[in-house]
Image: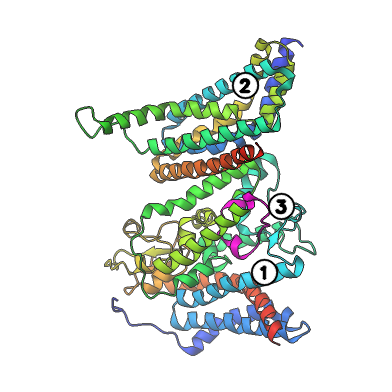
Amino acid sequence: MTDRVLPTPRRSIGKSLLLTLPILLWSLLMFSRSMIEPGRAPKLAAAATLVFMVALFFQMMRTLETHRWRRYFFVALGFLFPVGFIWQLYALRGSMSIPVERMLSGDTPFCFLAIPMMILPAAVAGTVIFPGSILPTASNPHAIAAMVALWFAATLVLGKGWCSYGCFFGGIEEGFSAIPKKPRIRRLDPRWRWMPWAVLAAIVLLSAATLEPVYCMWLCPFKAVTEYPAVRSFETAVQMGIFITLFAGLVVVLPLLTKKRTQCSFLCPFGAFQSIFNKTGAFDIRLDQSKCTPCVLCEKACPTMSITPEAVAAGKPLMSCMKCGACVDACVRDAAVWHIKGTEVGASSERARLMYLYSAWAFAVMFGGSIIAGALEKLFGLMV
Amino acid sequence: MPLTALMTEALLLGVSSGPVCLASCTPVLIPVLAAEQKSPRGTGALLAQFLGGRLAGYLAFACLAWLVGLSLQLQPRAHALIYGLADLGLAIFLASYALAMRAHPAASCDQPCPAARARLFAHRFRSFAPVILGFVSGLTLCPPFVAAGVRAAESGGLAHSLLFFLCFFFGTSIWFAPSVGLGLLRRFAAVGVVARLTLFLLAGYYGYLALIVLGRVVLHD
């Protein structure tokens, strides 16, 4: 491990508390409704989530590190989302599997992964191909319109940062990738980085041709931990086999072996789609060549292989960068910096980080925080 | 029915159902055009080859439509068999095409050798591929195509059926013209890599569909 060249900076407790205050107020606003709900479980869950989110943000302010503290939140979100989701499925349907008739009636909770597949059919045929309801209903609160609006608003600000603060699936593989101390597999063919784009192209074109959400039906690994078509035929058995194989391989085994987010890097078409919005967002990461040795610490730290020698030479990560902050935290010479487009590189890195973090964490509290609180409420309900 | 009215009807049917035709052909057409990484002019030539193959497919189907007349509505088993075989052929062809794209015509040996012959074969295969893919796409039973087939069968003689399909083809082809713009992406090398990977994925998808459909046909025997 390379020693840190510059002294490890640390902000004073008072200043850190002051910087955390807006997030504390925002969190109180977000969880105030749960605080006044009857019963102890909702109150406990809301309080625990509030403390968790505010404490993590305080640590980000105090230590000036981003990735480490964000990862606690993100892994919690990844592992607690299925808990709350499966619980709800059992409460509503008594099963994780969804029969075709329920799917056709629009009782499928909407997932943001379907957004890229819906664009062409909506433009060409004027139809929404996902079998969910556009507006929320009593049996299905996860409506299409709400999720699309939420995703769009967050994407405008965060770009592909959505994959580090909003995606409720990525935390599972990030959790597994954090377990080993060193990777067993170090060399991965960089050409595999293009696979998510190929999957995106294939599913968008096939969805337009078949008017079906092809990815959800055939390739989504997270069907294994959320809901899946009821296995009633050879076809649905194959579908289930694909879901489980992809989940086991890309979300569990490969992250353990490589310490990378392999599903995000090699399969997820939504990640590829989201990369486009890295071009439109205001924040990015820059690699200051005047300070870079290069020691490749940032390359090793990047969970999605977005930093390559070519990227270092170009002075910025590839467009697949998820703005998780791992490279900035790993860099011992402060060559990897947060940046606001249109400003000088490295001149106000901490200010750029703060501005980005306030947006990202406010969204994380509202979206991920509510998911965490919902799952905790169910778990506390069992105990209290 | 007067010839002008027949042609107008076919043209309008083609224009109105063109987006659906485009949607059903794009999984094959777009990756092929993107993978070849030609200039807009070269892409236009590829598109013309694809559309030529598609026209041949349409006309072949028109002959069939005229031959079988109103009995065009096939038995479900025959329908499934045609679908399954078409998907299987498409899958094999797409995978072969993606593999052939990796071979360059320049031989690595001076004398004719197996490697050079294989490369030459791959190069020739590549040059015919858009036509063949267009032909297979033309044979695919997409909904507007079936509608046109039924109408063509009712239109009278073989010449009328062929003319109807020709006009229908021109009507749908208008919607394909913007895909020439893919030629503008040729300066991005990554587009070619992604397109080739997409061809493999699509080959897997069509291959799987073929197995499911043909499996059903076999199991019903």
The mark lying in front, picked from 3 and 1, is 1
Location of residue B58 in the rendering, given as x and y in whole percent from the top left corner? 60, 22
Q: Which residue is mark 3?
A: A131
Please report, as a chain letter, where disc 2 is located.
B
What's the mark number on residue A86?
1
Q: Is residue A156 above or below residue B30?
A: below
Which quadrant of the view contains residue A110? Answer: bottom right
Chain holding disc 3: A
Q: Position of residue B144 (x, y in %)?
A: 68, 29
Task: Give the chain letter at badge 1.
Answer: A
Number of the label disc, if any, that sits on residue B61 = 2
For the C terminus of chain A, the image quarter is bottom right
Q: CA distance from mark 1 to mark 2?
A: 50 Å
Q: Is residue A286 left or right of residue B131?
A: left
Q: Residue pushed farthest left?
A: B110
Residue type at tag 1:
Ile
Q: Is residue B188 left or right of residue A104?
A: left
Above or below B171: residue A335: below
Q: Position of residue A214 (x, y in %)?
A: 60, 48
Which amino acid, mark 3?
Pro
Which quadrant holds the N terminus of chain A?
A: bottom left
Q: Do discs 3 and 1 share a chain? A: yes
| 3D distance between C-alphas at marks 3 and 1 | 19 Å
Above or below, B203 against B4 in this view is below
User: Of helix, strand and loop, which one carries label 3?
Assistant: loop
Which residue is depicted at the point 68% across and 51% down? A130
Q: Are marks 2 and 3 on the same chain?
A: no
Instruction: Report the magenta residues as a range.
Output: A215-236
